[in-house]
């Protein structure tokens, strides 16, 4: 199997992903004119063409590009299999925006292969997923090994929160059926040495905090000392929800009890990764982690709430800044919530606290989207736990490892509610320094090949246990 996948990736998949990286197919949240720009359609055509050619080797397989009115497209692939069970494999084709800071000779839409890594936006997050899924099915076909009926869903607005996906899942519900196994290839890995299973995902509570003190900017020499700074007020309001010294969220609504098994998995992951938990991050100068204990770092990024300021409006660039008191400050707040936290309720509480009794009577508004709750994986069935162990040992030479992820995959929370008895394999290739959403994102090619092989083994074991 490994030899087949090596050839498939080297000759077919990597060249196609290289072309995919060149297309600035930004998610609708970052490209509201995505229809007019046509990048999405170009990617759909590329993926569709590649997939149709490959699934022609899988008897009875079919592909449809589904387009609901006013929504991003979705690629829907069905591959017949043995037995009555269904496995659903998920990925997405939209991308995050460019981001600054790419290394010399590299860029978001400029694919570069260096040291077995394919650099560029979207290859690892998450363009490779469809190719890995189809590759796994082709590998099984070549070996004469059985798999259950497979449904592959590739959406186009995951990076915007997957707001179109529920409509497609409802629209296709009869064709999908009730999967007994879901495989998601949009997650991360603690290292590139073994298969990593994602056990949980954080949710998110996000919104824009705006503080307005003037109707227009005025000379700072005339107004400072009389008009309060909108930034200072915003800073004090943020301190209502986050301790400025420790970074700890201060609202009880954002906390949950960490399950003992997840705390134990964090300790095991810390033992495997050691200092790599934080040394993989590009700290500037003498900057240090917020805590010294590696296990606590893992729990902080997986089961505890954290706040990040991800954007600001109302301020000119330093070189364009005059002596003017700014009339307003708008700050984008991104609050990661624990996997089992009610993100909607947490968002409402944050809005209440931020807007209550504004200093100096300033106009304060927190425009928040409905929060997106996270996901905590169900316990692994014995057959799946054994399958993952064997697959990781066979293709990586090391046992499978388990760790929660700090990011969000809205699809998982939705499917978890929809299919409460379903087993989940959530994994991915976003390991140390792969830097999804940031500069120098890369796909570690050997890891992608091995993940694809592992998924093939899991699919075969799934079919065998289902009878």
Image (tube, rainbow, N blue to C red):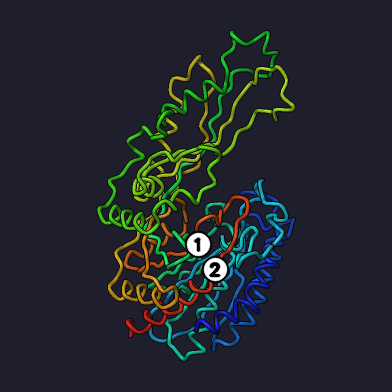
Q: Residue at x 38, y 62 (%)?
A: 418
Q: CA distance from mark 1 to mark 2?
A: 7 Å
Q: Position of residue 244 (x, y in %)?
A: 44, 28
For marks 1 and 2 on the same chain, the one whose residue lies earlier in the sequence:
2
Q: Where is 386 relative to 126, above or below?
A: below
SS class of the residue under badge 1?
strand
Residue 129 - label: 2
Residue 186 - label: 1
Q: Position of residue 120 (x, y in %)?
A: 65, 59
Q: Residue at x 55, y 84 (%)?
A: 4
Q: Are marks 1 and 2 in contact (CB under 8 Å)?
A: yes
Q: Is residue 145 visible?
A: yes
Q: Where is 228 relative to 351, above or below?
A: above
How packed mark 2 is, by other alpha carbons closer than 10 Å (few <14, some 14-19, many 20 or more), is many
Q: Position of residue 46 (x, y in %)?
A: 68, 71
Q: Residue at x 67, y 13 (%)?
A: 220
């Amino acid at each position: 199997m490994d030899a087949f996948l090596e050839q498939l990736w080297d000759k077919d998949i990597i060249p196609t992903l290289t072309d995919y990286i060149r297309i600035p197919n930004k998610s609708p949240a970052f490209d509201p004119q995505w229809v007019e720009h046509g990048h999405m359609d170009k990617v759909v055509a590329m993926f569709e063409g590649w997939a149709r050619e490959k699934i022609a080797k899988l008897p009875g397989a079919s592909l449809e590009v589904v387009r609901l009115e006013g929504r991003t497209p979705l690629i829907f692939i069905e591959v017949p299999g043995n037995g009555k069970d269904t496995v659903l494999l998920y990925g997405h084709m939209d991308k995050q925006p460019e981001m600054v800071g790419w290394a010399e000779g590299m860029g978001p839409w400029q694919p570069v292969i260096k040291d077995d890594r394919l650099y560029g936006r979207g290859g690892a997050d998450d363009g490779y997923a469809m190719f890995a899924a189809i590759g796994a099915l082709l590998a099984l076909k070549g070996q004469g090994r059985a798999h259950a009926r497979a449904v592959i869903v590739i959406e186009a607005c995951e990076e915007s929160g997957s707001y179109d996906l529920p409509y497609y899942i409802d629209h296709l519900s009869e064709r999908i059926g009730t999967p007994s196994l879901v495989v998601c290839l949009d997650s991360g890995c603690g290292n590139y040495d073994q298969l990593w299973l994602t056990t949980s995902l954080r949710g998110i509570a996000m919104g824009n905090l705006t503080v307005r003190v003037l109707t227009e900017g005025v000379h700072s020499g005339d107004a400072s000392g009389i008009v309060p700074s909108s930034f200072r007020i915003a800073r004090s309001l943020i301190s209502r929800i986050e301790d400025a010294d420790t970074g700890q969220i201060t609202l009880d609504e954002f906390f949950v009890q960490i399950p003992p098994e997840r705390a134990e998995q964090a300790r095991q992951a810390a033992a495997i990764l050691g200092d790599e938990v934080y040394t993989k991050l590009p700290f500037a100068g003498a900057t240090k982690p917020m805590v010294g204990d590696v296990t606590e770092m893992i729990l902080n990024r997986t089961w505890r709430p954290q706040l990040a300021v991800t954007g600001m409006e109302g301020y000119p660039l330093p070189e364009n800044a005059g002596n003017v008191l700014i009339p307003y400050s708008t700050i984008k707040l991104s609050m990661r919530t624990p996997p089992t936290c009610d993100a909607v309720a947490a968002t409402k509480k944050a809005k209440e606290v931020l807007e209550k009794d504004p200093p100096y009577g300033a106009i304060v508004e927190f425009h928040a989207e409905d929060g997106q709750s996270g996901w905590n994986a169900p316990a692994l069935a014995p057959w799946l736990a054994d399958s993952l162990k064997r697959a990781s040992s066979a293709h990586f030479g090391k046992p499978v490892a388990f760790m929660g992820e700090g990011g969000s995959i809205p699809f998982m929370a939705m499917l978890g509610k929809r299919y409460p008895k379903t087993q989940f394999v959530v994994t991915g290739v976003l390991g140390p320094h792969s830097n999804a959403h940031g500069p120098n994102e890369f796909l570690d090619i050997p890891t992608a090949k091995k993940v694809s092989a592992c998924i093939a083994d899991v699919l075969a074991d799934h079919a065998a246990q289902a009878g």
